[in-house]
Image (tube, rainbow, N blue to C red):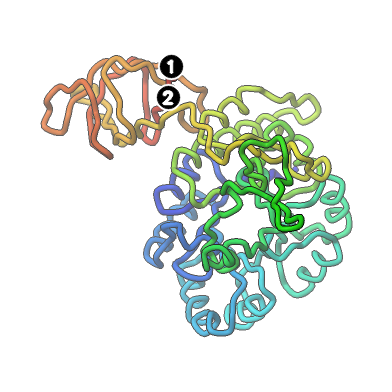
């Protein structure tokens, strides 16, 4: 049985390494041009080279986004950039535009090409079209149901990959083709600069003889474009058996902690399925873990049917945050039996915390003592990215993450 690919977002080199450490099979990243997340830190060519080498040493893959909807003047730099990507050794490029596709085929003909979700591929005829032109994979439109996905799988060649989003932010526009950002802020969403106006609060009114009446009565806070996040952790079995080849997690703008928690949860679920597919059972702990990262309310998107009013949150566009990511383990001071930790949020001696790591169950722990870089004992670590040494009542390892529940007063 060919095992499903778990594909994670990586906004920078740290998140790339965390994604692989926590169980991703591949990552998708953006370079400094041509990607749909221009506000992300993104990768220089040198960083990309380091990331690709890190991935390949683990037997894993790196895909690069080239999925803006370009104008003529965007394309002048593309051939030179493509040759640089080939030299770096990336495993595939992700494109949405037929012109970009054509330039890739002519410039670096041996490069694997994936068709972005921005291309709105929603049927087997379009999928076969791209395959016959030389594409290896389609990232299906987010608007497809399980049944529609299965029909594509049944009607395309066996060696064509089908990639689909399974987790993360949803767009209220079809396959992300939105012009609200352009209209309201002058920032082009289709060229990587979306201002996310769908998350803003609006008041919808209609004019009647010079008077304005509210259309959506009874809704106090009108975030009526605000989609809930997609979360399919409860349906891993159905996803695998629908014929999807690659599970894609959204979030190149998200933190290293988000990448770790999300990849870890889906990794555990996927691995559990393959142990015994016939008797696979959902473990609520996986969903609980996803809720311990910053998220919006969850929905199942289009997988079961077209979303209804429950797929949006009209009351707030804010993220739900129940835990603070407080630190990441860098190393171990064996001589003094202390862990070296980089602080990410304020922590105190005596804090009751949770510890997560790749391929382990969540641990409960207590911070017993902390020391600053000068070796002085401290009771709190308030400074951003402060390096501390910590005595703790459990065993840690490099890249384990520490988190603390946010207690509301």
In the image, is residue 6 above or below residue 283? Answer: below
The answer to whether residue 246 shows anywhere in this view is: no
Q: Residues within 10 Å of mark 2 (few under 14, many from 20)?
A: many
Q: Which mark is residue 364?
A: 1
Q: Residues within 10 Å of mark 1 (few under 14, many from 20)?
A: some
Name the side, left or right, on which 399 lies relative to 346.
right
Per the model, the C-alpha gap separating discs 2 and 1 is 6 Å
Q: How many marks?
A: 2
Name the side, left or right, on which 232 lies relative to 261.
right
The answer to whether residue 377 shows anywhere in this view is: yes
In the image, is residue 25 above or below residue 101? Answer: above
Determine the residue positioned at 84% across, 56% down: 152
Screen quadrant of the N terminus: top right
Determine the residue positioned at 44% across, 22% down: 405
Residue indicated by mark 2: 355
The answer to which of marks 2 and 1 sits earlier in the sequence is 2
Question: Residue 146's spot in the image, x, y percent?
Answer: 82, 45
Question: Residue 281's spot in the image, x, y percent?
Answer: 74, 24
Answer with the quarter of the image where residue 53 lies: bottom left
In the image, is residue 365 above or below residue 316? Answer: above
Determine the residue positioned at 49% across, 22% down: 362
Q: Secondary structure at mark 1?
A: strand
Q: Secondary structure at mark 2?
A: strand
Name the side, left or right, on which 133 lies relative to 40.
right
Question: Residue 280's spot in the image, x, y percent?
Answer: 75, 26
Question: Residue 271's spot in the image, x, y percent?
Answer: 64, 33
Answer with the quarter of the image where residue 327 lies: top left
């Amino acid at each position: 049985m060919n095992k499903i690919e778990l594909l994670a977002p990586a906004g920078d080199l740290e998140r790339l390494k965390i994604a692989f450490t926590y169980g991703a099979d591949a990552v998708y990243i953006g370079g400094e041009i041509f990607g749909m997340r221009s506000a992300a830190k993104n990768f220089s060519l040198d960083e990309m080279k380091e990331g690709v080498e890190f991935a390949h040493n683990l037997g894993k893959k790196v895909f690069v986004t080239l999925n803006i909807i370009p104008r003529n003047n965007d394309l002048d730099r593309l051939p030179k950039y493509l040759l640089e990507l080939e030299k770096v050794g990336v495993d595939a490029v992700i494109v949405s535009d037929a012109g970009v596709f054509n330039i890739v085929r002519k410039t670096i003909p041996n490069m694997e090409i994936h068709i972005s979700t921005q291309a709105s591929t929603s049927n087997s005829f379009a999928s076969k079209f791209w395959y016959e032109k030389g594409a290896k994979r389609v990232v299906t439109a987010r608007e497809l149901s399980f049944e529609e996905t299965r029909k594509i799988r049944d009607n395309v060649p066996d060696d064509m990959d089908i990639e689909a989003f399974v987790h993360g932010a949803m767009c209220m526009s079809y396959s992300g083709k939105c012009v609200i950002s352009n209209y309201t802020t002058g920032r082009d969403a289709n060229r990587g600069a979306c201002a996310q106006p769908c998350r803003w609060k609006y008041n919808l009114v209609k004019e009647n003889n010079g008077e304005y009446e509210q259309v959506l009565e009874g809704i106090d806070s009108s975030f009526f474009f605000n989609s809930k996040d997609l979360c399919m952790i409860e349906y891993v079995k159905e996803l695998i058996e629908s014929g999807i080849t690659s599970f894609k997690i959204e979030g190149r703008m998200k933190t290293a902690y988000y990448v770790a928690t999300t990849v870890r949860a889906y990794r555990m679920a996927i691995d559990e399925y393959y142990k015994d597919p016939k008797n696979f059972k959902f473990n609520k702990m996986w969903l609980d873990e996803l809720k311990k990262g910053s998220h919006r309310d969850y929905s199942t998107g289009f997988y079961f049917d077209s979303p209804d009013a429950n797929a949006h949150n009209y009351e707030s566009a804010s993220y739900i945050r129940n835990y603070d990511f407080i630190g990441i383990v860098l190393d171990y001071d064996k001589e003094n039996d202390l862990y070296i930790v980089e602080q990410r949020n304020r922590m105190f001696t005596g804090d009751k915390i949770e510890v997560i790591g790749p391929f382990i169950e969540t641990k409960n722990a207590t911070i017993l003592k902390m020391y600053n870089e000068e070796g002085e004992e401290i009771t709190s670590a308030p400074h951003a990215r402060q390096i501390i040494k910590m005595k703790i009542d459990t065993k840690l390892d490099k890249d384990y993450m520490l988190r603390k529940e946010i207690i509301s007063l």
